[in-house]
Amino acid sequence: MAKVQIIQTRSMIKRPETQQRTMIALGLGKINKAVEVELTPQIAGMISKVNHLITVKEL
């Protein structure tokens, strides 16, 4: 599987509960925090749900 770096670029304040829980499940929570994960179908679905809050880079 390919690895991707996910960087939180926008705040979770005033976002729906499901989006906040998705961000926490991805390992994010603060602006400019970055995590590296394997791009599985589950992670790709999570990324698509919160793509307006994050930036994704392929490694």
Image: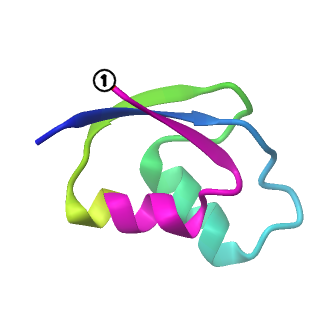
In the image, what residue occupies the spot 45% across and 55% down?
25
**Between 44 and 12, which is closer to the camera in this rendering?**
44
Asked whether, in this view, residue 39 is left or right of residue 23, the answer is left
Asked if 39 appears above or below 36 in the picture, the reply is below
10 within the magenta span: no
Quarter of the rendering containing residue 14: bottom right
Q: Residues within 10 Å of mark 1 (few under 14, many from 20)?
A: few
Where does the magenta region start and end?
44-58
Furthest-right residue in this view: 14
Instruction: Give the side of residue 54 with respect to residue 25, left or right.
Output: right
Regarding mark 1 in the picture, which secondary structure is present there?
loop
Question: Which residue is at a point 60% across and 61% down the rendered structure image?
Answer: 50
- Return the residue at label 1: 59
As drawn, which residue projects farthest toward the front?
A: 58
- Identify the coloring: rainbow
Residue 10 x %, y %: 78, 43
Pick out the residue farthest to the left.
1
Where residue 29 sits: x, y (%)? Answer: 65, 41
Residue appearing at x 86%, y 56% in the figure = 13
At x 30%, y 37%, the residue is: 37
Q: Is residue 38 above or below residue 24?
A: above
Measured as percent of width and height from the top left, residue 4 is found at 34, 34
Is 50 a magenta residue? yes
Q: How many marks?
A: 1
Look at label 1 and name its amino acid: Leu
Question: Which corner quadrant holds the N terminus?
Answer: top left
Instruction: Provide residue 59's location: percent of width, then percent of height.
Output: 30, 23
Q: Is residue 4 left or right of residue 57?
A: left
